[in-house]
Image (cartoon, rainbow, N blue to C red):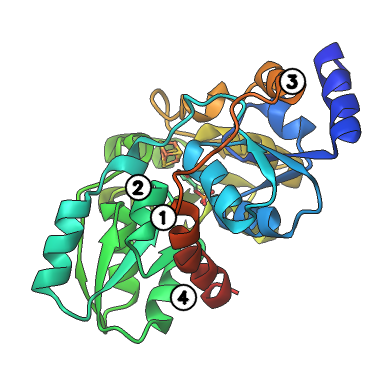
Amino acid sequence: MSDTIKRINELKKEKNAVIFAHYYCPEETQAAADNIGDSFYLARAAKETDADIIVFAGVRFMGESAKILNPGKTVLMPDMKADCPMAHMASAERIAEVRREHPGIALVCYVNSTAELKCASDVCVTSSNAEKIVRALPNREIYFIPDRNLGKHVAKAVPEKTFVFNDGYCPIHHGFSEEELIRLREEHPRAEVMAHPESRECILKHAGYIGSTAGIIDRVEHSDADEFIIFTEKGINYALKNAAPEKKFFYPGCGCECADMKLNTPEAILHVLETGENEVILEPGTAERALAPLERMLELGK
Ligand code: 13P
Ligand code: SF4
């Protein structure tokens, strides 16, 4: 065990702190974490933790959601620059316009969004519960923000509802190439193809399984296949290897690393545990207003 990890473990005990990490974080960070998971799992865990401090190795919207769901806790981000670009790809002006044009529409907000966007929303969703929640809503019209690809994937699964989409996207998943997927499939013809729903339709149409990061891991564990082509961020490889060490995984080549997630190094975690820097603090009133759509997600997503 490195000196950094030893010191992290000492400080965790001393300060009653826990480390949460998303599957896209660096391997050493996932190895040091108390809780690793997808966005939905980590949001629920943040609400339930008894710790005084949550060090959230993820991107900013994840730390914000933890703070909103459990405002009495101190939430520290290892690096404040770790932000999801898609979280900013919707606007209050467009929301107001759509609400005016479509009275009765439900504003469904993917959790990969700023706290301000959540405040304007009726319900939040993650990639693991979006279909279920959209289906459960009483509204027939859905405005899905910010991710167009996930929105279109949900719309296909819930054809009885009509959708207004927004132009946001994840630069990593949106960039995956269909040619590369076809090439990987030719090289590994026995492999099962899996994709995260932030990918474009030209990728999703080839996938035997589409789901959140936790969904992909679960599917790998339970599948009879022993080779997989995985179209999501490569950090998931650590959890996949732990879940199924005998199986083989193939990924798209360059451009499939989320640089923001990789900022969550053990050194950055140790620094915030030592100093208390990088605390998530929300504008007055924001946490209170963003709580209702997040709690509705936890309730409908159960
Ligand atoms: P998951 O909720 O599936 O872990 O996805 C989070 C994310 O940021 C995907 O890019
Ligand atoms: Fe955001 Fe994409 Fe990184 Fe996920 S992989 S945090 S959606 S930029």
* Residue 199 tag number: 2
- Give the mark nearest the N terminus, 1 or 3: 1
Please say if the residues under marks 1 and 3 sit with CB atoms less than 8 Å apart. Answer: no
Disc nearer the start of the sequence (2/1): 2
Q: Quadrant of the C terminus?
A: bottom right
Badge 1 element: loop
Mark nearer the N terminus (2 vs 4): 4
Callout 2 touching callout 1 (CB < 8 Å): yes
Look at the image and tell me whether residue 30 can be seen. yes
- Please tell me which of labels 3 and 4 falls first in the chain: 4
Mark 2 or mark 4: which is in front? 4
Q: Of 52 and 196, which appears nearest the observer?
A: 52
Residue 206 appears in the rendering: no
**Outermost residue toward the top?**
3
Query: What number is the disc on residue 292?
Result: none
Q: Name the residue under label 1.
A: 207
